[in-house]
Amino acid sequence: MDDTTLRPRLLMDAPMTIAMQFPKRIAKTLVALTLPVGAAIGGFLPAAGGAPAQTYPSKLIKLICPLPSGSVIDVLARLVAPDLSSRLGKPVIVENRPGGGFTIATKEVARSAPDGHTLLVASVNHLLVSKSLGYDPVTDFAPVGTFATYPWVLVVRPAVPARSVKELIDYANANPGKLNWGVSLGSGPHLLGEMFKIATGIDVAMIPYKSGTQAVPDMLGGRIDMNVATVSNLLPLIRQGKLRALAITSGARNEDLPDVPTMTESGFPRLTRGSWAGLLAPAGTTAHIVSKLNVEINASVTTPAMKAAMKTLDFEPKIGSPQEFAAFIGDEIGAWTPAAKAAGILPK
């Protein structure tokens, strides 16, 4: 069997795989969106002896994710893949290539044929890397489009005597070096933590983890004091009183956490930045392919079903043209570069 024969089967098996890998809240949403494409996937298979299609797409499309299964951008990619498959008429699968500080997946896509069949699921992490890693995060890729955005929530363990950002800063200043912050090195939450330290001047130790979610058990065990993550990941623990939410990075308060102020309300409007997910193609991909992908991803994430699914997981659709995505990338690089230098991700 060739790759195009095996991959549809992987998609049809996806509901069981998803149910085993993700928390119940996320798994339920993913399964609901995956089942329709699983039922229809047979329509994507080429007829025996038929001539291959001459128009794009002509084969399976891979969305390469630089983070492991269950990470935020992995979940987002799995949300959009089924509907994108239906729209493009070919299987669209998510392949995880974690490791190397996001570089393994990124290099794979940068070196892939610019034919639109291998795409990178990108986020803030992609933009702030040293050019010595063997690729340029801007010139080696063609922006296709964004498809989601999401805020982060700042939490502390209950033993930390702070019920607001101001109280946290006061406590940290009174106890320099006592607090620690669990982060995935080079991740968006890590960068936000560095921005927070720059903005407040507090002395907080950054404790590295392979994934930010791995810091949560240590928070519950009293070994980590602070963390930043998506609302969907931390909401159950916040509601149970096992973690205390101090602020959210969105422009407005979150419906699931109406009593938690925004960073702007807490006095730090420059920390009102969340993260996003988008698709990048290898540099040299034709404008026709980029445009087709952009149109279909925009259409996909604005359907009522996708909007509802994203809202369930505290994500918001984010659409725009490839040109707008390129401008957005430039703005993001400018905003996050100081934090990346402070974190040692970029040279000072």
Image: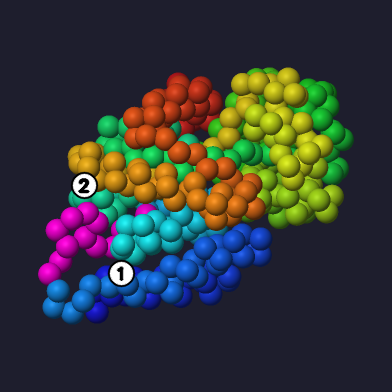
On the rendered image, what quadrant is the N terminus found in?
Answer: bottom left
Q: Nearer the viewer, residue 303 or 67?
A: 303
N-terminal of the pair, mark 2 or mark 1, is: 1
Using a 10 Å C-alpha cutoff, classify the residue at mark 2 as few (fewer than 14 neighbours), some (14 to 19) or many (20 or more). some
Q: In the rendering, which numbered label is found on residue 57?
A: none
| Element under disc 2 | loop
Residue lying at 48% horizontally and 48% vertically, measured from the top left: 301
Give me the C-alpha separation between circle 2 and circle 1. 22 Å
In the rendered image, which quarter is residue 86 located in? bottom left
Query: Which residue is label 2 attached to?
Result: 114
Q: Tell me whether the residue at label 2 lies in contact with that at label 1, contact meaning CB atoms closer than 8 angstroms.
A: no
Residue type at tag 1: Phe
Can residue 162 be seen in this snapshot? Answer: yes
Residue lying at 70% horizontally and 49% vertically, measured from the top left: 234
Main secondary-structure element of the magenta-colored stretch = loop
Residue type at tag 2: Pro
| Element under disc 1 | helix
Using a 10 Å C-alpha cutoff, classify the residue at mark 1 as few (fewer than 14 neighbours), some (14 to 19) or many (20 or more). some
Residue 155 is left or right of residue 160, and the answer is left
Verify whether residue 59 appears in magenta.
Answer: yes
* Residue range (magenta): 51-63
Is residue 336 depicted above or below 210 in this figure? Answer: above
